[in-house]
Image (spheres, rainbow, N blue to C red):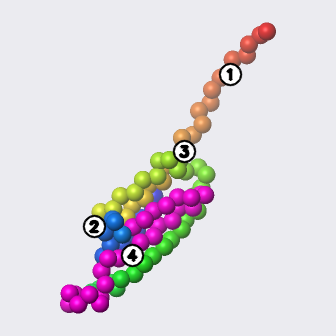
Amino acid sequence: MLLGDFPGMASEDINIEFHEQMLTISGASGISAGTGKLRRCEFDRRSLERSFRIHEEINTDGISASFDNGALTVVLPLMPAPVPRSIPVTTR
């Protein structure tokens, strides 16, 4: 699981892509200190991009993300463990 805080961003400001075992999270805050409407801004408009190499044991089809009150959670589920099975032997 990946967790991140993104103050001043909305879910529409965040982009998550997966390509060739790399998970990339990028985005930009929608607030700009130069808009003239703000009296005080703790965080300037910023863009970000972080990339993470994803191990082959991760079920890439099951990757999901949620965003709540500035906190991003990306769930990286593991592939199910292989189950031993019997292989019948046939005669000709």
Q: Quadrant of residue 8?
A: bottom left
- Dot 3 lies on which element? loop
Q: Which amino acid, mark 2?
A: Asn
Q: Taking 13 as reference, is 83 above or below it?
A: above
The answer to whether 46 appears left or right of 59 in the picture is left
Q: Residue at x 27, y 67 (%)?
A: 69
Q: Position of residue 59 (x, y in %)?
A: 53, 47
Q: Residue furthest top?
A: 92
- Please tell me whether residue 6 is drawn above or below residue 53 in the rendered image: below
**Callout in the foreground (3, 4):** 4
- Quarter of the image for the N terminus: give it: bottom left
Disc 3 target residue? 79
Q: Secondary structure at mark 2?
A: loop
Say which amino acid is labelled 3: Met
* Whether residue 56 can be seen here: yes
Please state the extent of the stretch shown in magenta in the rendering: 14-40
Question: Mark 4 = which residue?
Answer: 28
Report how far apart the C-alphas of labels 3 and 4 lie in the structure.
32 Å
Question: Which is closer to the viewer, label 1 or label 4?
Answer: 4
Q: Are marks 3 and 1 in contact (CB under 8 Å)?
A: no
Q: Residue at x 33, y 62 (%)?
A: 67
Q: Which residue is mark 1?
A: 87
